[in-house]
Amino acid sequence: MMQLAMTANPLVIRAHLESRGAWEAIYGLIRAPQYLTSEPFYANVDLLDDCEFQNLSADDLLLRVPSDYPHSFLLAVGQLTVTHSEFPVLIIALKADRGRSFRAIPSQIQGIENNLSIANMDYFEFADCADDDGIFGGIP
């Protein structure tokens, strides 16, 4: 079983290998700059596009996370992400609340990654703001 690689940034895992166009659109939205002020900020993420991770569930992905993995979460783009009109990306907790997940629209990934990576906010602060469908669209 292939383990996740140690990367400088949290991973965005392509878990649904069909719909290359949708995948590229979603990844483009994640990598796009966001503006809260005049200065842009970006999601500092690395891409994992490997057939070893195709169609894996959140539980399956958790089994592939090494114990010394440096990030507190990972992101997965699966079938639901590419077929849903809002492209909600699955975000899985790896440390506190391990295994807890929620989805977020791609335009919110920048803020989630930035805040979780520097421990400015906790995972639950985003997860608890997800709507009734489990999708985070921003902090109210």
Image (cartoon, rainbow, N blue to C red):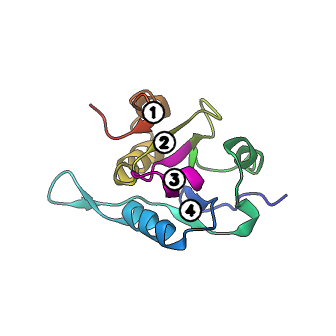
| Amino acid at pointer 3 | Thr
Amino acid type, mark 2: Arg
Q: Which mark is residue 94?
A: none
Q: Secondary structure at mark 2?
A: strand
The residue beneath circle 4 is 8
The three-letter code of the residue at mark 1 reads Asp
User: CB of mark 3 within 8 Å of CB of mark 4?
Assistant: no
The residue labelled by disc 1 is 133
Q: CA distance from mark 1 to mark 4?
A: 31 Å
Residue 73 lies in quadrant:
top right
Verify CB contact (< 8 Å) between mark 2 and mark 3: yes
* x and y, in percent, of residue 82 in the image: 51, 58
Q: Which image quadrant is residue 4 in?
A: bottom right
Residue at image point 63% right, 40% down: 94
Which dot, 4 or 2, sits closer to the camera?
Answer: 2
Report which residue position mark 3 lands on: 81
| Viewer-side label of 2, 1 | 1
Q: Position of residue 77 (x, y in %)?
A: 56, 56
Of badges 2 and 3, nearer the viewer stands 3
Residue marked by disc 2:
103
| Lower sequence index among marks 3 and 1 | 3
* CB-based contact (under 8 Å), mark 4 and mark 2: no
Rendered view: 30 above or below 95? below
Disc number lying in front (3 or 4)? 3
- Span highlighted in magenta in the image: 79-91
